[in-house]
Image (tube, rainbow, N blue to C red):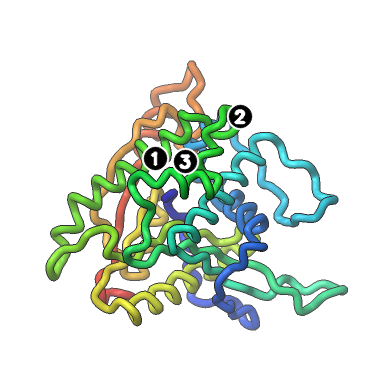
């Protein structure tokens, strides 16, 4: 639904930090939503969805009652990811994490942490075109309230961003070898992100490679598809075996970070935004994984 973060493409995790891939528990969703919030802070589309006029500060990843209170904007952003997590599960998708050893401390040397998060939709598991009840139950419709994302933000996600992706898929997928595909027939990377605390460890890359292996073991003739909004993401996915299929520029009215443009913004800033704010779709055909 909302794209992907550039994968950490280290060849392997550091010695002693081999991740364990497992399904996330719903009780972990508060922590997962905070990790996703911080991971996607630099991406233009996530800031544009929210309609912010200045960058958000990272949120604390701990969920204890002694944490600093989140700002209004931080609460809304975290709520967005909570809704996406819930929606993924409700339509038959899975939330998978790379469980990694946390940095050792004098009090606990065996603690585990989340190194990366993947929201995955298997073939045939998609949100129905008019499934407003599921959108409501997930909390996604609640984001339309004006003190969260508002109707404008909801329209940016559903009527612009998602519609652009749907149009690219409908144009490209029927021509994929050997006989063409429909979007719902493919495995879909709904969202993937590395925990910024473990940047450069390769956990997101390893998690995606694991899930791709699981997919092709069950559906050996079905592609894996995804969308990305950064050139870095293209390069990372190409190293895994994905191919760039199409791209669509988006007139966001923001700078390259997705932050609302100032009235006196220069042409250089606007030009950079036009070159940066681009949606892209990619696919991995069976037999193409690295």
Circle 2 packing at 10 Å, graded few (<14), some (14-19), many (20+), is few
Apparent side of residue 263 relative to residue 103 in the rendered image (left or right): left
* Left or right: residue 120 compared with residue 221: right
For marks 1 and 2 on the same chain, the one whose residue lies earlier in the sequence: 2
Q: Which mark is residue 238?
A: none
Q: Nearer the viewer, residue 173 or 266?
A: 173
Determine the image quadrant of residue 112: bottom right
CA gap, disc 1 and disc 2: 18 Å
Determine whether 261 is above or below 106 in the image. above
Disc 3 secondary structure class: helix
For the residue pair 198 and 282, the one nearer the viewer reads as 282
Q: Quadrant of the C terminus?
A: bottom left
Name above or below for residue 2 compared with residue 253: below
Q: Position of residue 55 (x, y in %)?
A: 59, 36
Q: Residue at x 59, y 49 (%)?
A: 37
Q: Secondary structure at mark 1?
A: helix
Label tally: 3
How far apart in space, not on screen, are marks 1 and 3 (Cα)?
16 Å
The residue tagged 2 is: 147
Q: Nearer the viewer, mark 1 or mark 3?
A: 1
Mark 2 vs mark 3: in front: 2
Q: Is residue 176 visible?
A: yes
Looking at the image, which residue is at 24% across and 55% down? 245
Q: What residue is pinned by disc 1?
A: 158
Tell which circle, 2 or 3, labels the residue nearer the N-terminal end.
3
> Residue 262, position in %: x, y?
51, 21
Query: Residue 152's x, y, as percent?
Result: 46, 29
> Residue 62, percent across and down?
75, 56
Disc 2 to disc 3, how far (Cα)? 21 Å
Q: Quadrant of residue 196?
A: bottom right
Question: Which residue in the protein does label 3 denote?
Answer: 44
Q: Is residue 41 left or right of residue 220?
A: right
């Amino acid at each position: 639904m909302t794209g992907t973060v550039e994968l950490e493409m280290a060849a392997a995790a550091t010695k002693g930090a081999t991740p364990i891939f497992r399904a996330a528990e719903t009780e972990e969703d508060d922590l997962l939503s905070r990790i996703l919030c911080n991971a996607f802070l630099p991406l233009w589309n996530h800031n544009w969805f929210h309609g912010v006029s200045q960058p958000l500060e990272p949120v604390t990843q701990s969920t204890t009652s002694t944490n600093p209170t989140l700002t209004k904007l931080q609460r809304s952003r975290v709520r967005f990811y909570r809704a996406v997590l819930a929606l993924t599960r409700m339509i038959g998708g899975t939330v998978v994490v790379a469980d990694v050893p946390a940095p050792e401390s004098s009090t606990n040397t065996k603690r585990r942490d989340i190194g990366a998060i993947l929201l995955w939709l298997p073939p045939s598991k998609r949100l129905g075109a008019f499934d407003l009840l599921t959108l409501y139950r997930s909390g996604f419709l609640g984001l339309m309230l004006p003190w969260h994302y508002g109707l404008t933000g909801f329209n940016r996600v559903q009527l612009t961003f998602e519609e652009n992706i749907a149009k690219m898929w409908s144009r490209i997928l029927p021509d994929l070898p050997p006989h063409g595909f429909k979007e719902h027939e493919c495995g879909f990377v709904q969202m993937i992100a590395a925990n910024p605390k473990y940047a450069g460890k390769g956990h997101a890359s390893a998690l995606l490679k694991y899930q791709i292996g699981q997919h092709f073991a069950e559906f050996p003739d079905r592609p894996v598809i995804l969308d990305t909004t950064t050139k870095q993401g293209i390069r990372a996915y190409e190293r895994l075996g994905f191919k760039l299929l199409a791209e669509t520029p988006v007139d966001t009215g923001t700078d390259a970070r997705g932050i609302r443009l100032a009235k006196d913004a220069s042409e250089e800033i606007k030009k950079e935004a036009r070159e940066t704010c681009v949606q892209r779709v990619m696919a991995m055909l069976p037999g193409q994984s690295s």
